[in-house]
Amino acid sequence: MAVTLPHRPHLERFRRDARRLQRAVRDGDAEALALVERVIGRPVDAATLPLATALYAVARRHGFSSWPRLRDYLRTAERLGRDTSTDPGEDPVARLLAHACLVYDASDGPDRWAVARDLLATDPAAPQRDPYVAATVADPDAVAAHLAREPALARAQGGPFGWTMLFHVAYSRVPQRDPLTTAALLLDAGADPEAGYLWQGAPTPFTVLTGCFGGGEQGPGRQPAHPQGAALARLLVAHGADPNDAQTLYDRMFARDDEHLRVLLPLGLGHGPGGAWHRRLGEALETPDEMVRRQVDWARDHGFTDRLALLAEHGFSDGTTADAPTPWRARRGLPPVARAGTPDAVRALAAAGGDLDAPYEGRTALHHAAWVGDVELVRALLEAGADPTVRDATYGTTPLAWAEHARADATAALLRPVTPG
């Protein structure tokens, strides 16, 4: 069972849930009793339901095998959690660091990084004074000087989000002098290649590797990969980072670009025990094999044929074809156009009379392709007759508006001439 948790989960909240569940069952609530019996897999005596059973049911409902496993995870999440929406205040160094790096929310993007660049321009000596600024701009001379004065900085946490220097190197999106040399200096000095945090307590860690590859729900224009992300990732794995990075796989899952997989699969993605984060989180985090199997399912359901072939080359395939139904697809009810993930598939669907504007999750395939900056797919959809004026169900906006908001300049340029107004 997959783990499902709310944002900022707290132990006392789940204890209260268990007590409420216990009271409801003892008071004769048939729905509560059915829930308990379903998640624990056996009948119970409603009149005498013990709190221990209710705690177990709550843990099982959220995907954990026992209450102690859920309790231990929540204690770990409290220790490793970070909230990158924290206001850095008026301190210019804190503001610089907060605006220079990806934080994986809707504030990411060129406007944010421009603030950091302006702050750097007004204080060019900041890298010499602050080690985290030195790491953010990847100045190896400044970083070496800081480490010479205080070697413990290699593993220390600082800045507005409590990140390590190595973390700032990977998450920075302002111009950097020499990120590979800077990262190598920090790693040789003892920096943790598997440093990371749990965003608001969620069980998928944001690691140094995550920052290398970018991606995410805001689109590649707002959350791009690090300019030298592939080389940084190889350097990190060579120094002990585990390649099984669940957040990277999620962030890069929605578009056809497979560079992250081409880097990580030869380095061991999908194999092994999962490194430090599996030791920390246990069953809350998918196993390496489960992570990659999920990628196979997604690629098949969305017609990412190149990704399927790449995964199969590395032994991750269940032998079915792209047209074979899966439980995930049946549950989501994806229309044919949502499973046409390549230009050739779009053209074939159009030739067969398929609906190119069929909505799914409140948007069309053209909205999604525009958002993720897929120039070839947008061009194929337009040439095949997709309607660029269709508005999504959530925001009431066109594919062009999605491209512009995502800073996907190339797809916006294709859509602008064919979008009235």
Image (spheres, grey):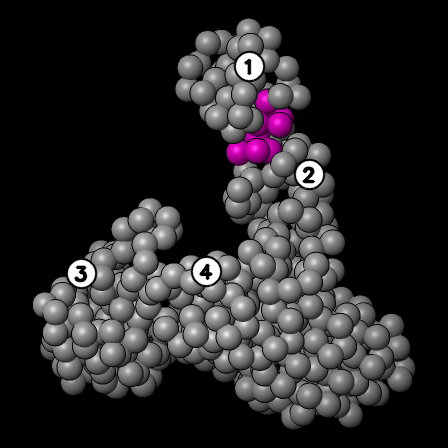
Query: Residue at left 32%, top 58%?
Result: 324
Q: Single out the mark in the foreground, 2 or 4.
A: 4
Name the quadrant containing residue 159: bottom right
Q: Which badge, 3 or 2, comes first in the chain's sequence?
A: 2
Q: Quadrant of residue 363?
A: bottom left
Among the two numbered marks 2 and 1 on one chain, the one whose residue lies closer to the N terminus: 1
In the picture, the quarter occupied by the C terminus is bottom left
| Residue found at the very far front of the displayed protein | 319
Q: Position of residue 135 (x, y in %)?
A: 70, 81
In the picture, the disc for residue 318 is 4
What crowding class fits label 2: few (fewer than 14 Cα within 10 Å), some (14-19), or many (20 or more)? some
Dot 1 amino acid type: Val
Q: Are discs 2 and 4 less than 8 Å apart at CB? A: no
* Residue contact between numbered discs 1 and 4, judged by CB atoms under 8 Å: no
State the CA–CA distance, disc 2 to disc 1: 22 Å
**Mark 1, secondary structure of its residue:** loop
User: Residue 69: which disc?
Assistant: 2
**From the viewer's perspective, is the residue at label 1 or at label 4 nearer?**
4
Q: CA distance from mark 1 to mark 3?
A: 46 Å
Task: Pick whichever, 110 or 285, lies toward us.
Answer: 285
Report the amino acid beneath label 2.
Arg
Please, is residue 97 above or below residue 202 in the view? below
**How far is the residue under mark 1 from the one under mark 4?**
39 Å
Q: Is residue 400 left or right of residue 269?
A: left
> Is residue 376 found inside the magenta-colored segment of the image?
no
Point out the stretch of residues depicted in magenta.
Answer: 54-61
Q: Which residue is mark 1?
A: 44
- Looking at the image, which is closer to me, 31 or 273? 273
Specify the amino acid type for callout 4.
Answer: Asp
Discs 4/3, front: 4
